[in-house]
Amino acid sequence: GQQLNQSPQSMFIQEGEDVSMNCTSSSIFNTWLWYKQDPGEGPVLLIALYKAGELTSNGRLTAQFGITRKDSFLNISASIPSDVGIYFCAGQAGTNAGKSTFGDGTTLTVKP
Amino acid sequence: DAGVTQSPTHLIKTRGQQVTLRCSPISGHKSVSWYQQVLGQGPQFIFQYYEKEERGRGNFPDRFSARQFPNYSSELNVNALLLGDSALYLCASSFFQGSTEAFFGQGTRLTVV
């Protein structure tokens, strides 16, 4: 089946630094999603990407849909302590948000 | 407006028992999906229901079943529990099957001992 490889697995950064994480797939996706999950909570959608090459921002977050449709990346600029959490990429072969394939997450730790 | 609500929040069961988890979608949403999230991994798709019909099933054994009610709430049932079924079970709701956004509940933490 479809698999997503998300890297890095974990990151330890200083407050104020920029962060970059990415996701690659063995299959083509039509939609890429980026979620953040805090302890004891469900994932919360951060950014959705619908077109190859698309670059979308949400505040300090920027994500891009790769040209090959097999990858995506997420950047966080000027990190703050509340950015701590697990970031997941998810892909959809069709346009059905209820049936997404998730990566295994990048755990972000921000040191004040 | 209430978000996706799941009950119970935590549950401890013994191997071989059966469990039922419940989910109420966001008001107006007609699609409910269930995911299993094992510690240290991303959520894995189990089922999607839309308009009370199963619209998708992930790679899970027949011990897993679900249904959706006329009010669009849903139940996930797992029979003959195994230790490996211990996980966070997440419910996600979306407006319709082809929606590009889904909203997750906080999950039910199931521990099988």
Image (cartoon, rainbow, N blue to C red):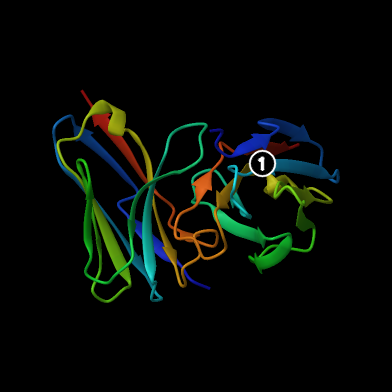
The residue at the point 53 percent across, 44 percent down is B104
Q: For the view shown, which residue lies furthest in the top direction?
A: A112
Q: Nearer the viewer, residue B80 or B4?
A: B4
Q: Nearer the viewer, residue B63 or A69?
A: A69
The residue at the point 39 percent across, 74 percent down is A26
The residue at the point 29 percent across, 34 percent down is A83
Q: For the view shown, which residue lies furthest in the front direction?
A: B28
Q: Residues within 10 Å of mark 1 (few under 14, many from 20)?
A: many
Toward which corner of the image does residue B5 lie, by quadrant? top right
Q: Dot 1 falls on which chain?
A: B
Q: Position of residue A14 (x, y in %)?
A: 17, 31
Q: Nearer the viewer, residue B112 or B22?
A: B22
In the image, residue A88 sits, relative to residue A37, either above or below, namely below
At mark 1, the secondary structure is strand
Q: Which residue is mark 1?
A: B24
Q: Position of residue A87 (x, y in %)?
A: 36, 45
Q: Amino acid at mark 1?
A: Ser
Asked if residue B63 shows in the view, the reply is yes
In the image, residue A98 sits, relative to residue A87, either above or below, namely below
* Direction from residue B87 to residue B21 in the image, left or right: right
Total labels drawn: 1
In the image, residue B45 sits, relative to residue B86, either above or below, namely below
Q: Position of residue B96 (x, y in %)?
A: 56, 59
The residue at the point 35 percent across, 57 percent down is A6
Asked if residue B37 shows in the view, the reply is no
Q: Position of residue A81 (x, y in %)?
A: 26, 27
* Direction from residue B71 to residue B104 in the image, left or right: left
* Direction from residue A32 to residue B72 in the image, left or right: right
* Direction from residue A5 to residue A82 in the image, left or right: left
Q: Quadrant of the C terminus of chain B?
A: top right
Toward which corner of the image does residue A15 lie, by quadrant? top left
